Image (spheres, rainbow, N blue to C red):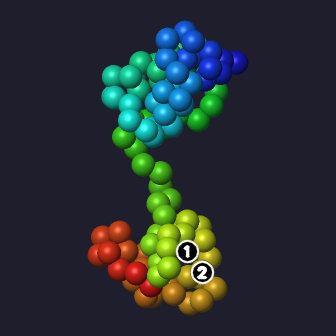
């Protein structure tokens, strides 16, 4: 099994650059991400790889008092009966609960 550190050494990059490229985060160019992902797949990297520019499916939700994870918000909505308050559309309409 190949590690992120091994990929970094082979490509002459820092571990942080490789991690960012494989996780789709940070300031990495599309070219660098494609190079790192291609090398990782070719050499049998078994960790999680997220495509360049993709976003996680469970984005955080802003509620009064701060930001909570989507899972926490879903629990709160169920426990407190917020299901029809419209907060799930908060990203589009910028509403808060």
Disc number placed over residue 87 in the picture, else none: none
Nearest the viewer among 26 and 45 is: 26
Instruction: Pick the quarter of the image with the C terminus.
Output: bottom left
Circles 1, 2 touching at the beta carbon (< 8 Å): yes
Residue 56 at least partly seen: yes
Give how far across and how far down residue 78 sits, in percent: 60, 83
Relative vertical location of residue 86 with respect to residue 35 in this rendering, above or below: below
Give how far across and how far down residue 38 sits, in percent: 46, 19
Mark 2 surroundings: few (<14), some (14-19) or many (≥20) residues within 10 A: some
Instruction: Pick the quarter of the image with the N terminus.
Output: top right
Query: Tag count in the figure?
Result: 2
Determine the residue positioned at 49% across, 11% down.
Answer: 12
Extreme-left residue of the structure: 93
Disc 2, SS: helix
Mark 1 surroundings: few (<14), some (14-19) or many (≥20) residues within 10 A: some
Report the side of 61 relative to 8 (left or right): left
Report the side of 90 relative to 64 (left or right): left
Relative vertical location of residue 77 with respect to residue 27 in this rendering, above or below: below
Using the rendered view, name the quadrant where residue 93 is placed.
bottom left
Using the rendered view, name the quadrant where residue 87 is placed.
bottom left
Extreme-right residue of the structure: 1
Determine the residue positioned at 62% across, 15% down.
Answer: 6
Determine the residue positioned at 46% across, 30% down.
Answer: 21
Residue 22 at least partly seen: no
Give how far across and how far down residue 65 sits, in percent: 50, 79
Question: Dot 2 corresponds to which residue?
Answer: 76
Relative vertical location of residue 60 with respect to residue 9 in this rendering, above or below: below
Nearest the viewer among 62 and 49 is: 62
Give how far across and how far down residue 15 sits, in percent: 56, 24
Disc number placed over residue 73 in the picture, else none: 1
Disc 1, SS: helix
């Amino acid at each position: 099994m190949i590690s992120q550190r091994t990929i970094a050494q082979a490509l002459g990059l820092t571990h942080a650059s490789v991690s960012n490229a494989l996780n789709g985060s940070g300031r990495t160019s599309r070219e660098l991400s494609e190079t790192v992902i291609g090398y990782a797949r070719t050499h049998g990297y078994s960790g999680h790889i997220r495509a360049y520019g993709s976003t996680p499916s469970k984005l955080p939700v802003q509620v009064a008092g701060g930001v909570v994870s989507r899972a926490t918000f879903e629990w709160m909505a169920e426990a407190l009966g917020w299901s029809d308050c419209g907060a799930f559309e908060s990203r589009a309409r910028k509403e808060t609960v």
